[in-house]
Amino acid sequence: MPKRSIKKLLPTPQRLKQWRALSIFGRILDRTTLWQVNRVSIARATAIGLFCAMIPLPGQMLFAVYIAIKAEANLPLSFSLIFITNPLTMPVVYLAAYLLGVWLMGVPVADVNNIDWLAPLSDEFLAIWPPFLLGCFVIGCLAAVAGYLLVDWIWRLRIQQRWSDRRRRER
């Protein structure tokens, strides 16, 4: 993968450090390993970002940054990929997660007409959470593994292509 293209797309360290929520990480954000663009760092960041994007709770951003720090993954990419789930994509992703969870648990699909959406502690509302969370976890894991493998494969393919181009030019 072209490093320059990736670097252009990612937020700069200065821009990310301006986020007040990330100030809890303090000087840790100054580590150079968190800003490197290489195959391992980018593949790890992709997996982290895609997994954290499927977490249906507030704090996805902090969770993604924390894991990126621990895994020494590219922090800007981990941070950026959580925005895959946004107000436009959430209904589709979360409905798919719920239906997957229902299928995996073997429970019936809840009748949305019987759910009091303004009473989040009602029995009907609480009944949808276990399959929903299971579906989010499974989709997150699958997306993380697929993202990691895809980025790693594309990066390796690009390196092989550059080597073959170089050999052709030398002949």
Image (tube, rainbow, N blue to C red):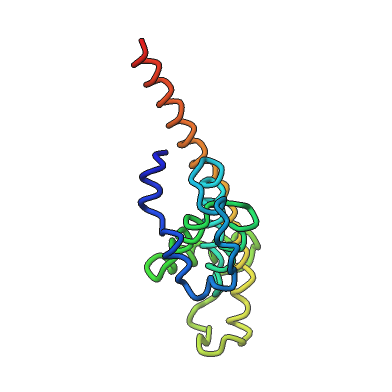
* Residue 60 position by quadrant: bottom right
Q: Nearer the viewer, residue 132 or 56?
A: 56
Is residue 139 visible in this depiction of the protein? Answer: no
Q: In the image, residue 105 lies at what x, y percent? A: 65, 62
Work out whether residue 11 can be spotted.
Answer: yes
Seen at 52% across and 84% down, the residue is 114
* Residue depicted at x 57% and y 50%: 33
- Return the x and y of residue 82 as percentages of the image width and height: 48, 62
Q: Is residue 120 above or below residue 53?
A: below
Q: Residue at x 37, y 13 (%)?
A: 170
Between 45 and 169, the residue placed more toward the observer is 169
Residue 91, relative to residue 171: is it above or below?
below
Residue 34 placed where, x, y %?
Answer: 55, 54
Quadrant placement of the N terminus: top left
Q: Position of residue 77 (x, y in %)?
A: 47, 55
Q: Residue at x 47, y 36 (%)?
A: 155
Residue 122 appears in which quarter of the rendering? bottom right
